Every structure is written in C-alpha cells, then in structure tokens.
Amino acid sequence: MNNVWEEAKYNLKQAAEIMGMKEDLLERLSTPMRFTEFTIPVRMDDGTRKIFMAYRSNHQDATGPTKDGTRVRPDLTPEEIKALSLFMSIKHGIGNIPAGGGKGGIKADPSKLSEGEYERLIRGFIRKLKPKGAWVDVPGADIGTGKQAMAWMLDEYEQITGMHCPAAINDKPAVLGIGGSKGGFEATGWGVAMCTVEASKEMGFEPKNTSIVIQGFGQVGSITARTLYDRSFKITAVSDINGAIYNDEGIHIDELVIHVEKTGTIRGFEGARTMDAGLLLEKDCHILIPAAVQDVITSENAGRIRARLIVEAANAPTTPEADSILEQRGIRVIPDVLANAGGCIVCDFERIQGLSGDYWDEDEVHRRLDKRMMSAYSEAKAVMEEKGISMRRAVWVNALEKIVEAMEIRGWS
Ligand code: NAD
C-alpha cells in the first residue's frame, strides 16, 4: 500500500467486513463527505505574494460536527488529510465523543516563514476556509500549528463573525477570553501512558521490571515517558530526529527532559549511551512506543521487533503488512486510534467549556480524561475478546458501529 489514505481505507474495509456493513454505507464512508481544496495568497516580507495550497476534509457528520487538527508541512498531500479525517471519525467513535471526523492542512514549511508570514498564512486559512462554527466544523492544531496559531485562528474567526465564539476553534491557549482547556498539552501523552499501564497489568508486567523504548521525544513522547517513569517503569531507550540513546538500567527521564529543554535534543545526554537510531525499534524491550512519524514499522523490520507490546502514540506508525506480521508473531498492538485519542477527548472538553463558559481546573480535566480513556479501552477490549479479533480491528468495529447506527437512524441508508 503506497499511501496513508489507502491504508486508512483498508482498515475501514476490514472492519466493515467483520461487521457486515451495508455496501452503500461502506461506499459513503470510503470518501470524505466534503473535501475542500483552496489557495491562500500570502504577502511575504519582501513584498511579493506567494500562493499556498490548503485543504479541509470533513469525513462524516452523522455523529456530530466535524472536528480536529490543521497540519502545516511542506510535503503535505490531500490523501494524508483525507486519511486523518477518517481516523478522527474513528477516534471520536471509540471515545464516545459526539463529533464527526475533520482534518485540515496547509502545504508550507513553517521553519522557512517569518513570524509575520506565518501569522498571515494562518489567518488566511480561516478567511479562505470560512469555517461555520462550533456546530458545524471545528479546526484544531496538528503538526506545524500550536497554541499561538490557534489563538490567531480564533481571533480571525471572531473578527469575521463579529462575536465571541471560543468553541469554534480547538487547541487554544488556556487564557481568559480565549477559551483553551487546561490539561490539553499533556492529554495525548497521558492517554498513551494510561493505555500502556492498563495493557501492562493484563500482560502481567511489573512496572519496575518492565523496559520501554520510545521513538520520538516531542510533545507526546516526552509526556508519555514522564508519566510512565513516574509510575516506576524503566525507559531504556529513546530517540528523536537527531539520534538515539539507551541505558539498560533505565534513563532518568526528569533529567533528560531538563537536558532537552536546554539543548533542544536528546543527544549529548550524560545519563545514557548513544546507539544507532536505525536499530531502536528492534531493541530488546517489553514495550515499544512509536511516538514520532508514520510508517516506521514495516514488513521489512516487523519480523525483528522484540517488544511484546506496541503502543502506537504516533498516527499510523505501522503499515498494514507489518500489522499482519506482528499479529502472526503474537505481538500485541494498542492501535493509534485508541492510544492517542486523549488529545481529541480534551478537545471535546474544550468545546464543551467554550459553549458553556464554565472552565474546569486541571484535576477535573484529568479525572474526566482518565474515565473516558479507560471506558474507550474497555469497550475495545470487550469487542476484541467477543469477536476474537485484534485490538485495531476491535476499535474500528466499535467506532464504526456507532457511526453506522447514527447514519441509519437518520435514514441515510
Ligand atoms: P512533536 O513534533 O512534538 O515531536 C515529534 C518527535 O519525533 C520529536 O522528538 C522529533 O525529533 C521526533 N522525530 C521526528 N522524526 C523522527 C524520526 N524519523 N525518528 C525519530 N524521531 C523522530 O510531535 P508530537 O506532537 O509529539 O507528535 C508525535 C506523533 O504523535 C505524530 O505522529 C502525531 O501525528 C501524533 N499525535 C500527536 C498528537 C498531539 O496531541 N500532539 C495527537 C495525536 C497524535
């Protein structure tokens, strides 16, 4: 399979077969309900105008307003955006979030833009997209966008509509009048860690004797590492784009976080040794957590992975071919659409808080997030055991059953 949209549709088809989904519904879910492609003209600092391609995919809205992130990267493809919008439908389904799947993106390299150019690009995205608000389509953040970008998006949207609408944009800073939720930054890593703890218990792993290897030490990888380290798990190797380090006795994660804050990379950390980053995924360990980029576990390396459990923090880190190999080898996989759903659960909380004007403290957000993550995990596990299928298939089946139920009761089939 040569692209992530084909892979996403493959997962959809596999689950549809298990469920016996009606042909017309499968056809409807195999293409986004709406896909918008548009251009954003941006005035550059040197006075020239540059045109950037942008996309927004609304996968389905039977289960609620479409919701989620805006990715900005130079080699972005429309297929990637379509796939991610389908993933969002599944994450919202398994998380019992009343929302459909949405994803947007701009083909641009933020590192090559000045702050002013980047701001004009982000504001241009909202002006050209003309999102219709909290009850229709809610853009959030993804790779290449963060809290500042989302605050600009909200401001642009409110200038266009002439009213305050904090629930119209997600992933905003938790600043008075801007409407972000507390706990949003940690949510995805926290959810990944919760799934890891739960699966470890089932597999009889004792935290202090359990070794974990993590690929990627950004927002998700570092929070996952810290949360698991605080629960006495041994993080024995980590990597980032610059390389990989290991310490079989366990890396002191609090010290590593300080080192990364100072230097911007895990490289040069004194409490661990350097290793070949190409061999990180194959390192002997109990649990492997890919938390960097897609398609890193492939048919080429799946046979050499030594972990007994893989928790997919990144989106689509495992190709379908590799997934079959892992299943045959009895390696358990907690799939991305469940493991990294914590972020979209807190986005749902952000929208609820924005609509009600009642903002929660961090403990309240964590309490609700734990409950939602654990109930998503238990639902997936129950389907897995009842149908004798992998957890990936179970999550897709569980989410799609809810989507299909909403479509049918609306009279769409
Ligand atoms: P990030 O940019 O903060 O961190 C990415 C990390 O991966 C960095 O440490 C980077 O150096 C490293 N990296 C990049 N390429 C690498 C490579 N080839 N090998 C090893 N390391 C590499 O991103 P993030 O927000 O932590 O997201 C990580 C993954 O999780 C992505 O796949 C993203 O789509 C997914 N995800 C993130 C969220 C979220 O809330 N941030 C939610 C759902 C899914």
Image (tube, helix red, strand yellow):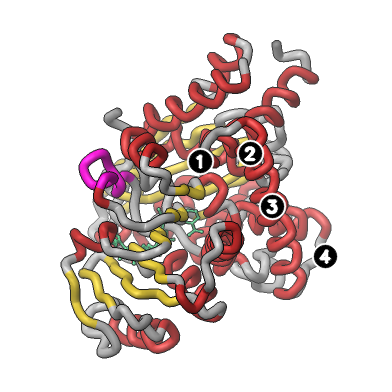
Quadrant showing the C terminus: top right
> Can residue 18 be seen here?
yes
The residue shown at (47%, 41%) is 104
Residue 143 at x, y percent in the picture? 41, 55
The residue shown at (63%, 12%) is 22
What's the amino acid at mark 1?
A: Lys
The quadrant of the rendered image in which ligand 1 is seen is: bottom left
> Mark 2 sits on what residue?
385
What's the amino acid at mark 3?
A: Asp
Going from N to C along the chain, the mark reached first, 4 or 1, is 1
Going from N to C along the chain, the mark reached first, 4 or 3, is 3
Q: Secondary structure at mark 3?
A: helix
> Mark 1 sits on what residue?
103
Question: Label 2, label 3: how many angstroms apart (C-alpha)?
Answer: 29 Å
State whether residue 69 is above or below residue 207: above
Magenta region, residue range: 295-303
Q: Which mark is residue 348?
A: 3
Q: Mark 3 and mark 4 in contact (Cβ < 8 Å)?
A: no
